[in-house]
Image (tube, rainbow, N blue to C red):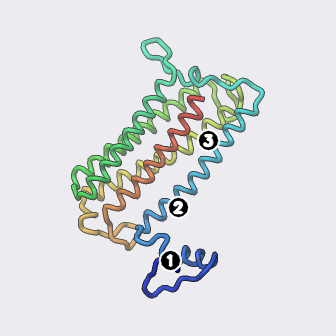
């Protein structure tokens, strides 16, 4: 007795070819899932592979170099009242980004409750958190560049430290910057009532809905999660 679900007007094909046909036709695998969510999950999966390649390359490069690797506590120390505090700036950046993930989750909650005002302000709070993070990252980059760190050389130790640092944190910072731009756009659309009115988007014929806030939230939570791995592997190891 077959346990396959039945869909009116659709005939299931047996075997692996049937599974491929079913997946491609979007009949059961994504049944009931908003197309935007499905596409965002697929994008995040592909992005996971890219960040994984970067971090694995970093671990391979660090483990194989015969030159002493720089001590993160010294390289990323920040002077506070004349005393060098290890990873002070990085800790603040991490706190700000994780906090912004919380405000994003609340924005999704109030969006589905159709509380336009609270949703909009929480999106702006999230965007300001991301903007603060990017600003601190710019300060971190300028500090290290001033100290002589380059993609091809590094006064603190192994030369490849600079290339890994600028590549990984730069790629992540680009994601955060793109997210901040979209957060401000979505804040405007929320305050303008586009989601309440079902107004069509600028580049699509689809009607707007608060599910778009959740889709953007998926992206923002992913960016925050990736930073946790970068923080663990790059700054704490």
Q: Nearer the viewer, mark 1 or mark 3?
A: 1
Residue 42 numbered mark, or none = 2
Mark 2 or 1 closer to N-term? 1
Q: Secondary structure at mark 2?
A: helix
199, above or below 97, in the image: below
* Residue 29 x/y as whole percent: 49, 70
* Residue 180 screen position, x and y as percent: 41, 48
Q: Nearer the viewer, residue 52 or 151?
A: 52
- Can you give x and y, in whole percent of width and height, for residue 153 in the image? 70, 30
| Other residues around mark 3 within 10 Å, as few (<14) / some (14–19) / many (≥20) | few
Residue at 49 percent across and 35 percent down: it is: 137
Residue neighbourhood size for the residue with mark 2, other residues' Cα within 10 Å, grouped as few (<14), some (14–19), many (≥20): few
**Residues at circles 2 and 3 in contact by the CB criterion of under 8 Å:** no
Q: Is residue 8 left or right of residue 25?
A: left
Asked whether disc 1 touches disc 3, contact meaning CB atoms under 8 Å apart, the reply is no
What residue is disc 3 on? 167
How far separated are the C-alphas under marks 2 and 3? 23 Å
The answer to which of 201 and 234 lies nearer the viewer is 234
Mark carried by residue 98: none
Using the image, tell me which numbered label, if any, was put on residue 4. Answer: 1
Distance from Cα at disc 2 to Cα at disc 1: 25 Å
Question: 181 or 70, which lies in front?
Answer: 70
Residue at (37, 42) in percent of width and height: 100
Residue reaching furthest to the top: 82
**Residue 151 vs residue 227: left or right?**
right
The residue located at (50%, 48%) in the rendering is 175
The 10 Å Cα crowd at callout 1, few under 14, some 14 to 19, many 20 or more, is few
The quadrant in which the C terminus is found is top right
Which residue occupies 72% across, 23% down? 68
Mark earlier in primary sequence (2, 3): 2
Secondary element at tag 1: loop
């Amino acid at each position: 007795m077959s346990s396959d679900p039945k869909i009116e007007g659709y005939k299931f094909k047996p075997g692996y070819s049937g599974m491929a046909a079913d997946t491609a036709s979007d009949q059961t695998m994504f049944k009931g899932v908003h197309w935007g969510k499905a596409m965002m999950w697929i994008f995040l999966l592909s992005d996971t592979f890219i960040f994984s390649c970067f971090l694995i390359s970093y671990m391979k490069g660090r483990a194989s170099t015969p030159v002493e690797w720089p001590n993160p506590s010294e390289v990323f120390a920040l002077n506070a009242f004349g005393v060098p505090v290890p990873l002070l700036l990085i800790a603040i950046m991490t706190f700000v980004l994780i906090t912004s993930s919380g405000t994003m989750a609340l924005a999704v909650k109030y969006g589905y409750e159709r509380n336009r005002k609270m949703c909009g302000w929480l999106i702006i709070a999230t965007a300001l958190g991301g903007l603060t993070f990017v600003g601190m990252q710019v300060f971190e980059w300028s500090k290290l560049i001033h100290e002589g760190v380059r993609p091809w050389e590094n006064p603190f130790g192994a030369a490849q430290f600079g290339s890994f640092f600028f590549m990984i944190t730069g790629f992540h910072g680009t994601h955060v910057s793109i997210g901040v731009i979209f957060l401000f756009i979505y804040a405007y659309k929320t305050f303008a009532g586009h989601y309440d009115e079902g107004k069509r988007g600028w580049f699509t014929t689809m009607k707007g809905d608060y599910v778009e806030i959740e889709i953007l939230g998926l992206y923002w939570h992913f960016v925050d999660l990736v930073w946790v791995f970068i923080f663990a592997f790059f700054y704490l190891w």
